[in-house]
Amino acid sequence: MSELVAGYGQLLGEIKQRIRSAQYAALKAVNKELIALYWDIGMLIVERQQGATWGKSIVEQLAKDLKAEFSGISGFSARNIWRMRDFYLTYHANEKLTPLVAEISWTHNLVILEKCKDDLEREFYIRMARKFGWTKNVLTHQIENQTYEKTLLNQTNFESAIAEDYRNQAKLAVKDDYVFDFLELGESHSEYQLETAILAKVQPFLQEMGGVFSFIGNQHRLEVGNREYYIDLLLYHRALRCLVAIDLKIGEFEPEYIGKMQFYLAVLDDKMRMPLENPSIGIILCKSKDKMTVEYALKDATKPIGVATYRTFSALPQELQGQLPGPEQVAKLLEGIE
């Protein structure tokens, strides 16, 4: 009896996990069916509209009849039916995106449909929301803060410093520019004030960093020989399974910052990295940077490092608007989001 009691906790835990897995699988299946239903309704409306003079009154009548017939089911408002039509029209000719839209919820799809400009941007947010489990609010925040554009513009040495099997995924973990408007800092502030403000708003900070980071600590101490060194912020990227060192700088990027970060990463890999974890990554956050200077500074760096800017106000700088890579490069990068 004592042995049965001793093993009961493990048994209960395993059964609970199995139930949760089944519930999640059921929810995914229900979501796929719902998306398929809305897709079919959108398709039927588009087909009937071809060569006919369908207007607002027809859809309003359709919504009224459907709600009367299926009174216990929501989602058949006239507005939502028009959305189903737009949903089908947006994706029906794209064989790549058609199966992906069923992997996220209808509310997520609506956010992407309403806020994204083209198929590549839609694909980016669909894949990111699916992979990292973004809520609707997080997805909206990422789109409004232009995560797609900032990710495509990022400056790293990952092409040479990270293994090919997770290189594209790592590139997507670093933006070119971060918006910390939630910190409520003035334009002029010290590194101590910046770090203190981040510590007071850790969750919004992690969300802006990408939503898949865990916070380990600040002023993380490294002992090397008879000296001590401190990393401003230490995070963990759950998807990449690696430590991420953050160096905060309130001025313009300087080339010597790379050497300091390489030192931090070497010590982290030697003293903290676990056997199954990937090599540590460094992100240098500066108030400003000269892209050519960053490019040369990263050229011979062997540790994976990204250099980004941060701002305490919103909006992508105008000078970056026309610098996005071409469609082929974007499509290749998106292959890293499974």
Image (cartoon, rainbow, N blue to C red):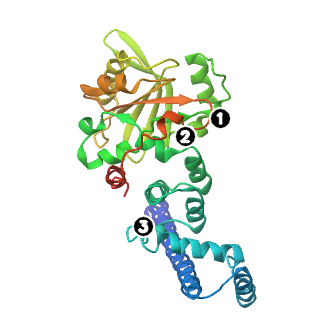
Relative to 279, residue 92 above or below: below
| Disc 2 + disc 1, Cβ < 8 Å | yes
| Disc 2 + disc 3, Cβ < 8 Å | no
Q: Earlier in the sequence, mark 2 or mark 1?
A: 1
- Quarter of the image for residue 316 reads top right
What's the mark number on residue 24? none
Q: Nearer the viewer, mark 3 or mark 1?
A: 3
15 left or right, relative to 260 = right
- Residue indicated by mark 1: 182
Q: Nearer the viewer, residue 193 or 294?
A: 294
Coordinates of residue 219 in the picture (x, y in percent) = 49, 21
Q: Residue at x 36, y 49 (%)?
A: 326
- Residue indicated by mark 3: 97
Q: In what quadrant of the picture does the C terminus appear?
A: bottom left
Q: Earlier in the sequence, mark 2 or mark 3?
A: 3
Residue type at mark 1 is Phe
Coordinates of residue 144 in the picture (x, y in percent) = 59, 47
The secondary structure type at the circle numbered 1 is helix
Relative to 118, residue 168 above or below: above
Mark 3 Cα within 10 Å, few/some/many (few <14, many 20+)? some
Mark 2 Cα within 10 Å, few/some/many (few <14, many 20+)? many
Q: Nearer the viewer, residue 44 or 24?
A: 44
Coordinates of residue 127 in the picture (x, y in percent) = 44, 58
Mark 1 Cα within 10 Å, few/some/many (few <14, many 20+)? some
Q: Nearer the viewer, residue 291 or 266?
A: 291
The secondary structure type at the circle numbered 3 is loop
The secondary structure type at the circle numbered 2 is helix
Residue 173 seen from this side: no
Residue type at mark 3 is Leu
Coordinates of residue 319 in the picture (x, y in percent) = 49, 33
- Residue indicated by mark 2: 208
